[in-house]
Image (cartoon, rainbow, N blue to C red):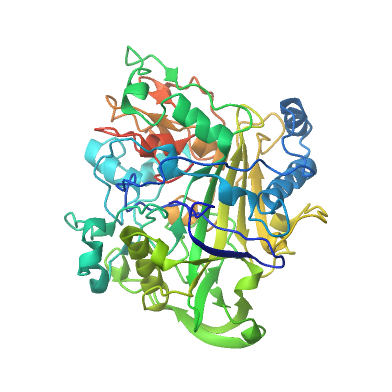
Amino acid sequence: MKQQRALLAGTAALAGSSALFALAACMHRPASSASQVTSDMSVCVDPLAMPSGYGYPAREATVAGWVERRDTRAIREHGWSLFAAMNTAPDPDGEAVWRSWCTSTQAFAGATVPTPAPVGAAPATATRAATGQVRSLNAIRAKHGEPINFRATPQYQLPAAILNDPAYRQCIVPAQGETPAGLTDGAVFQSNGDIMIAGVIYNRDAYDWIRSRGLYRTATLRGLQPASATGQAEMPEMPAGSIVLKPMMWPVPQDGVSALPIWDGPDSDHDRYAGFEVHDMWPRAVAVTTDPASEGRRISGALQLNGVTLNGAAMGPSRYPDMPVVGTGRFYRYTPDLAALGACDRALLDASAWWAYGKRFRQGDQLVLIAMHAMTKEQRAWTFQSFWWHDRPDAGPYAADRPALPNALGPWRHYLMTETYGTTMAPGGTRWPVAYNPYIELAAAHPIETNCMNCHHRAAWSDIRADRVSYQLEGGPDALAVFDQRNAIFDGIVKVDSMWAISSRVPNPRPTPGPVGTQ
């Protein structure tokens, strides 16, 4: 999942301004655990700093004060300011700041990559089944509260046109048993295993730390491995100033519309997978168009979900009889230059478009940003804020506390936000509040009652303790529990400072399972 920063050829429009913007994507349900691509994009050149005037960085003591006082308004205003700042160009003719930042491909260049996991099964599911560590997610819920992943997730069958295209031969992950064939990462985009095009990117501080400390090498993390099964260890903590982003994009044809499901709830779990493919949980959609003259109409249409199944049953098409038509100008949007992309990036775009609207991605089609996680090292525990697009962006609690930012360009006000900085559900409590991105967590088979900080604080790596599934060890903390970093779930493994990408990307003969493709 690479996003297209200054390193990607192509044009990107920052709606409502003359600035340019390029998007990355992040993956949820993996088609690959790490990129197999050897790319000449191995060095990140001149990433821009965050612009001034948006309150970044906040002092660690300031963030601690917000958390201690339970000052949700200050926290949310800071999160909104971060989002607007990252998507603002340094000058009227420039590009959005984070377009210049570093891709996961660059950060982990030089790593020898293991065979990718196949499309269709959440990373935890396949490995748990192999190790026998988690016998029943329902039993875990009964004993310990929320699980981290549901077992049943959609399987996306690749279209024959991609499977049989000689140009894409090196991009195919062969089918394994009942798991269909999938796609590897490209040099620019990362394989997400579904419609969404994904990426993880790093600012200069985060990128330099990974490269200078050798945190992309197996030998580095192996050297940190605890000497005993009960010992604990951690990698060198990411430096203050680090920012890690995880965006998701959606394809839109130049000569039609793309149905985008919209999340309006529910607010509690229904004990099953709840990703955007589940029509009864996402009963409403908008029709996204590249033609601004078409806005304001209402039309019928469908999200095709070609070849998508759940428990063997077809999931699509999801039909919407009354969709409002919205233009891509309401999104951060990007028009890829297909001639500048490698085969595996084009394969990912083709598969995404096929699943969404039934044809290959063509020159002139666009990608729109529908979701983004953002982690900042403004405190040791990181700040977490996550954004998603909505056609009613001024309604409800996720629209609250959006500040006036006159210098912020583009459609940042069309997004909603959730955040978690360390404030517990109740004063002095031991439970985190629910904080999730519907396009990211739900499509990753996480329950609705999930918290970003809880998940990321479990991030770990091991090549000798494949049985230590730290993020969902049977008997360990549930999805909303506040737990100490000295918890026994970390015995015998290496904590990686909330960076699941380290777990996913650093080669490992028997990798510690994790939410593949996360930051």
Instruction: Tell me which residue sits at (38%, 33%) in the image.
Output: 473
Q: Is residue 125 above or below residue 177?
A: above
In the rendered image, which quarter is residue 504 located in? top left
Does residue 256 appear left or right of residue 470 in this picture? right
Residue 115, horizontal then vertical, whole percent: 24, 44
Residue 306, horizontal then vertical, whole percent: 34, 74
Does residue 477 appear left or right of residue 223 in this picture? right
Residue 71, horizontal then vertical, whole percent: 78, 38
Residue 135, horizontal then vertical, whole percent: 29, 40
Residue 100 shows in this picture: yes
In the rendered image, which quarter is residue 467 located in? top left
Instruction: Tell me which residue sits at (52%, 87%) in the image.
Output: 300
Q: Is residue 73 above or below residue 469?
A: below
Instruction: Tell me which residue sits at (38%, 75%) in the image.
Output: 316
In the rendered image, which quarter is residue 273 located in? bottom left
Residue in the foreground of this view, choosing between 441 and 213:
213
Does residue 424 appear left or right of residue 178 in this picture? right
Instruction: Tell me which residue sits at (62%, 77%) in the image.
Output: 326
The single residue placed furthest to the top in the displayed view is 227
Total count of labels: 0
Residue 280 shows in this picture: no
Residue in the foreground of this view, choosing between 196 and 454:
196
The single residue placed furthest to the left in the displayed view is 177
Q: Is residue 176 above or below residue 353?
A: above
